[in-house]
Image (spheres, coloured by chain):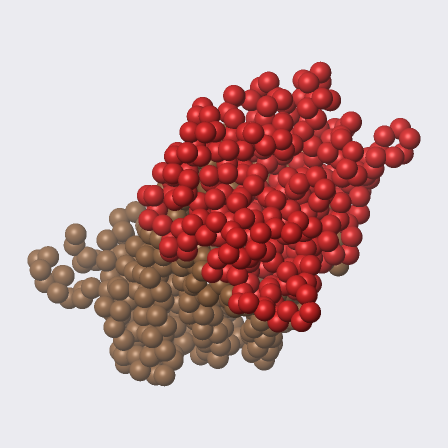
Amino acid sequence: MNPVGIPLKEPSVSAAAGDTEQLERALIDASTRVPVLIFYTSAVGWLILGTLLAGFVSFKLHTPELLANVSFLTWGRVRPAHMNVMVYGWASMAGMGTAIWLMARLCRTVLRYPLLLVAGAGFWNLGVFLGLCGVLFGESTGYQWLEFPSYAAIILFVAYTLVASWVVLMFRFRRGDQIYITQWYLLGAFLWFPWVYAAGQLMLFVVPVQGVLQAAVGWWYANNLMFLWFGAIALGAVYYMIPKVIGRPIYSYHLAVIGFWTYALFSSWTGMQRLVDGPFPAWMVTASIAATILTLIPVATVGLNHHMTMQGYFPLMRYSPTLRFTVFGAMSYTVFSLLGILISLRSVARYLNFTQVSIAYSHLGLYAFFTMVIFGSMYYIVPRLIGREWRYGSLIKLHFWASAYGIGLMTLMLLAGGLAQGTSMENPSLAFSESVQSVLPYLRGRSLSGILLTASHFIFAYHFGLMLFGLGRKSTVPTFLNPVEAEEASAH
Amino acid sequence: MKGLAPLFLGIFGTFAFSWVGLTVIPNWQIGALNPQSDEEGTDIYPLPQSGMVTRGARVYAANGCFYCHTEQVRAEYAGADIERKWGDRRSAPRDYIFKRPVLLGKMRMGQDLANIGARAPKEEESPAPAGGASPAPQGAAAPSGAVASAKAGSPPPAASPGSAVASKAPASPAPVASSSSPSAKPPAVAAAGASNASPSPAAAAAAGSPAVSPSPSAPWPEQTAGLPPMYSAAWHHVHLYSPRSVNFDSNMPSYRFLYRLRRITDARSSDALQLTGSDAPEQGWEVVPTFDARCLVAYMMALNQSHPLKDVRSAGAPAAASPAASPSPAPGGQPAK
C-alpha cells in the first residue's frame, strides 16, 4: 500500500483558526492531566493485580491442590477477587479516566472542579480495596459481579456520585450546541451506571426480592453493567478514536443515532439470556433471547458505520497503535455479540449453558472488546497528558500481539473446552466426571494464554510507568508501530 | 442532535423499560409466592430454613462453591439433568422462596447440587448430628490400596476417562464392572458399577421408571469402601476435607481450612472425621469440623427439591408407577404422596 496522502497526524487546520484550536486543546488536555492520570495509574495497578489473580485462578482450576489449604487463597475466593478487581478496579477506572478526558475534549471546556474527580478516584480505590479484602476474607455475597460486601459497595457508590456530578457539571459548561455521538454514549453510561448499581444493590441487599428473582436481578445487573456501562464507554471511545486518528468524519451520523438507541433499548433487555431454561417464567427468558437477537441491529449499524469510516484507511493500522487496538476492539464487539446471540438460543444453551463457554463470552466482552478499546484510547490520551510520546514502538507492538494472541487463544480454548464439556454433560450415559475431565486439557491451554496476557500487561505497565516518570520521547511526532519514513521510501 | 431533554428522556426511558420489564413485572408475578400445602394445611413445602442452614448458605457463597456447582434442575426437554438423576422434576421458583442468597450457579465444573440432600441415606434426612452415627472402620482398617492409588498423584488425563468409561459402560452388568481391576480403580468409581444391587432410592427410581434405558448403574456411587455412607453428613465432611480420597477424578479443591486438628483428650469426639490413609491424623489426634463446616454440610443436607410441586410435573411419573416406586421421600421422612 502507499501511505502517501494519508494523514498520520491530526489534520492540520488553516493557520489562524488552527492555532487557536490547538492552543485550546492543549489547555484542555493540561487541565485533565492530574485527574485522568490518577484514574489511569490506579487502573494499571489494579490491572496488574487482577492479572496475577487471574493466572492463579486459572492454574488452580486444573491443579486443585495448589495452595488450597489457605482460606483466603481458596479458588472460590480468588476467583471473585480476580473478577471484581478487573471489573471495578481496572475496567471501571480506566473507563472513567477515558470518559473524563473525552468529556472535557468534547465539551470543549477546561476541566473544572478537579477535586471532585480526585476525591472520586480516592474513594473508588478505597472501595475496591476494601471489597477485595472482604471477598478474600470470606464476606463475598454470592452474586456474580456484586460480590463486594455492602460497606465496599457504599464507598464505591459515594465515589461514583462524585464522578457523575462532575460529568453533569461539565455538561452545563459545555460550549457549542452540537452533542457528538460519543457524548451520548458517555452520558448514557454515566446515567445508567448509578441506576443499575443502585437497583442491583437495593433489590438484592436492602429490600431483597424473593427467591429466584435474586438471581434474575443479579444477572440483569451483570449484563447491564457489561452493556450499558463498559460497552457504552467503549463504543463512545471507538466513535471518537477512529475518526480522530484517520482524520475523517464518521461515515453516517444517522446510522450512529440508530445504533445508539437500538443498543440502549435491546441490550438492556438481554440479562436473562444467561439463565436459559432456569426456574423462571419462560417469558422472561424468551424476552431476553429475543432482545439478544435484536441486538443484531445495533451490532450491524455500529459495525457498518465503523467499517465504512475505516474503508480505505485500514492500512493505517500498520502505524497507529491507537487505531490498531481500537479497531481490534470494535471488531471484537461484533464477535462478542454474535457469540452472545448464539449461546442464548435454547437449542445451543442446552449444551453450552453450564460450561466454560460463558467464561469465554465474558472475556470476549470485557477483554477483547472493552479492554482493547481502552488500551487504544490510553495510547492516544496519555501522551497528550504528559507531553511526551511513547518511548518504544516495539513495546507497543509486543503488547498488542501478546494481548491479541492471548485473548484469541483463551477464547478458542474456552469455546472448544466448553463444547467438549457440554456435549459430554448432555450425554447421560457418560459419567459426570467425564465432562470435567474432558475440559481439563483446554483449561491447561487457557493457562498458557494467561501467560501471554500477563506478559502483555507487564509490558504495558512498564511502558506506562516510563511515561509517568517523564521518560517518554520528546517529539512532535507520535510513536508509530512501524517506521513511516522507511515504508514510504521502499514504496516508491 | 440539539437539546438535551430528548437525550435524557431516552436514556432514562430505555433504562426504565428494562428495569420494569425484567425486575418489577417478574416481581409482581413471582415475587410473593407462598409455600404450598395440601387441603388440610399440612405437608407444607418448602419450609423456612434453620439458622445453621442459613449460615451454611453464607459459607457456601463466601467460598465460591456456586462458581462450580449449580442448584437448578432443568426440565427434560431442556437438558439431561433429570436423566442424570440430579432431580426427578425441574426446579421451579417456589423451591427457592426461603433461600437467601439464591445460588443458582452458572457453571458445572461439579455436579448439580439442587437435590444433594435428597440423596442422603434415609436415616440422615432429618437434621442429623454432624458426626454420622456409624462407627466406621478407622485408619488402618480401610482398604489402603484404594487410598494409595489416590495418593499416587494426579493421573495422566488419558487414564482416568478410560477407567470411567470402563466402569459406567451402561449395559455391562455389575460384576464385570467391578471385576475389571478392583484394586487399581478408585473406590468411588468402582462402587458405581456395583451400585445396581443397592436398594437406595435412586436405584429404585432408575429401576422403577419405565422410560429410562435399562442402564443399571446409578448416576452416582452409593457406597465407597471404608467411608461413611455416600452423601451422609459424615461423608460430606470427608469429601470436603479430602475430595480425592473419595472420588479419584474429583477436581474440587480441599477445604481443610474449615477443619481443625486437635488432640484427643479423653475419648475421640463423635464428630471427628473418619479419615483413612495419609489423610488420617497421627495417633492421639483427630480432625473435627469447625462450626462453619458443620453449617455448610447442614446447608447441603437441606438442599432437597424432591417434594412434588403442584405446578410442576415430576419426571418419570406415569401416575400408576409412581406411588410404589416413589423415588424420593418427603422431608419429614414419609414417602412422598
Query: Is residue A398 left or right of A220 when viewed as pictured?
Result: left
Residue B157 x/y as whole percent:
35, 46
Viewer-proximal residue among A212 and A341: A212
Q: Which image quadrant: the C terminus of chain B?
A: top right
Q: Residue at x 61, y 44 (%)?
A: B229
Q: Which chain is brown?
A: A
Residue at 59 percent of width and 32 percent of height:
B198
Number of callouts? 0
Residue at the far right: name it: B40
Specify whether residue B322 is in view: yes
B48 relative position to A125: left or right: right
Q: Is residue A168 visible?
A: no
Pick the residue in front: B120 or A127: B120
As displayed, is residue A237 above or below residue B184? below
The residue nearer to you, when weighing B152 against A288, is B152
Residue under the image location 26 percent in, 48 percent down = A312
Percent x, y for residue A119? Answer: 59, 78
Chain in red in the render: B
When asked about the image quadrant of residue B86, the answer is top right
For the residue pair A383 and B161, the one nearer the viewer reads as B161
Q: Quadrant of residue A205?
A: bottom right
Question: What x and y, as percent, mark residue B102?
Answer: 67, 49
Q: Position of residue A409 (x, y in %)?
A: 32, 51
Vertical comparison of A102 with B322: above or below: below
At horizontal 34% and vertical 83% (from top left) the residue drawn is: A470
Q: Within the image, what quadrant is residue A9 found in? A: bottom left
